[in-house]
Image (tube, grey):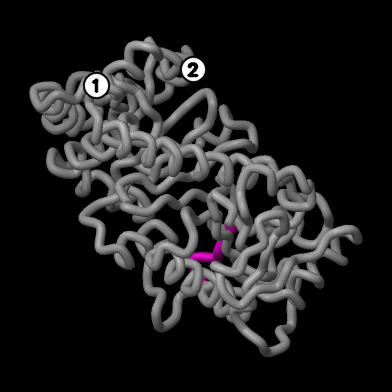
Amino acid sequence: MSDKLKIGITVGDINGIGLEVIIKSLVDQRMCDFFTPVVYGNTKVASFHRKAIGVNDFSFNVINDAEQAHSKRANMINCWQEDVKISLGEENEIGGKYAFLSLEKAVEDLKAGKIDALVTAPINKHNIQQEGFQFPGHTEYLQAKVEADDVLMFMVCDELRIGVVTGHIPLHEVAANITEEAILKKLALMNDSLKKDFWIEKPKIAVLGLNPHAGDHGIIGTEDDQIIRPTVEKANEQGIFCFGPYPADGFFAKGAYEKFDAVLAMYHDQGLIPFKHIAKGAGVNFTAGLPIVRTSPDHGTGYDIAGKNLASESSFVEAIFSALHIVVRRREQAELLKNPLAFRKLSKDRD
């Protein structure tokens, strides 16, 4: 029996680029040296995408259960049997329906321990809405399925790790959701994840301001001085090594993020715009705070390039290896914590 980790992979919106980047990621047989892929989808749909991008020397090993996965093949579980009409580049109910069937089965297996981690291909947050999925996105769905108290959307790449206080909410609702409680919760999640998932012993976290120039002493908004700054001070009192609030524009323009282990942004675009620019197509979305490990690429469904063989698999490959590394780190830490002396020795060796 293979001791390699099994990584579950969902296909996302079948009218988008999900299966293209999955196939491009797994066509290199060397990938199976590191993990056993288990894709949740449908072989006929996969074959359609494979032919659309001109890949002829690749096929999935069909299995009925993740426990049957071949350790040296890319495996696929058929999550539905009926024929499906694929409309590349089109947003429709079909794309959402089958994205959910893939996700539902994969999460079921993840919770049952049949796979070790989950990498999700992009969904469309509008067409996936149906009975069983009434959430803004993957993050909130997974939080509900595992009954996690809170989670953090944590974008990671070699150069930068950045999380957000407010995720998928309208911009006009952001300010009302910037509270001491919300910031402290996200800082605690980030701090814990940096230690547990990235093995950073004493994380150093930067906190961005909400308003231009971090409020400029109350002239351009009071949230920075009245909420964020006191919360940063309180977090430090609780043992979280953090600084701020920093004006977001100058913080990234001057490369100040390079001096920190992670950055906490106040809202989605404040964090993701600089992240995607810096990551240059190799970023990963990691859901911190879950008892299970889930990652995804940092791009969307890519309807405009679906089926044109233009999608890069770089971010998806990074998402796979990020999931692998996090699972291994969590398991190693769990083992080491059983033997504190061994943990102290390993920490000294890494200093």
- Whether 123 is among the magenta residues is yes
Query: Seen from this angle, which residue lies furthest front?
Result: 1
Query: In the image, which residues are magenta?
Result: 121-126
**Residue type at tag 1:** Leu
The secondary structure making up most of the magenta span is loop
Position of 9 relative to 93 (above/below): above
Tell which circle, 2 or 1, labels the residue nearer the N-terminal end: 2
5 in the magenta segment: no
- Residue under the image location 59 percent in, 79 percent down: 79
What residue is drawn where x is 48% and y is 53%? 117
The three-letter code of the residue at mark 2 reads Ala
- Give how far apart the Cα atoms at labels 2 and 1 are: 43 Å
Q: Residues within 10 Å of mark 1 (few under 14, many from 20)?
A: few
Q: Which residue is mark 2?
A: 253
Asked which quadrant contains residue 231, the reply is: top left
Question: Which residue is nearer to you in this view: 206 or 26?
Answer: 26
The residue that mark 1 highlights is 341
What is the x, y in percent for residue 291?
31, 52
Where residue 123 appears, as percent x and y from the top left, is 55, 63
Classify mark 2: helix, strand or loop: helix
Q: Is residue 240 above or below residue 13?
A: above
In front: 351, or 182?
A: 351
* As drawn, 86 above or below 195: below
Residue 22 figure quarter:
bottom right
- Side of 112 where 66 appears, left or right: right
Q: Is residue 304 visible?
A: no
Residue 197: in sight, yes or no?
yes
Asked if residue 2 is positioned above or below residue 193 in the image, the reply reads below
At 28% from the left and 47% from the top, the residue drawn is 174
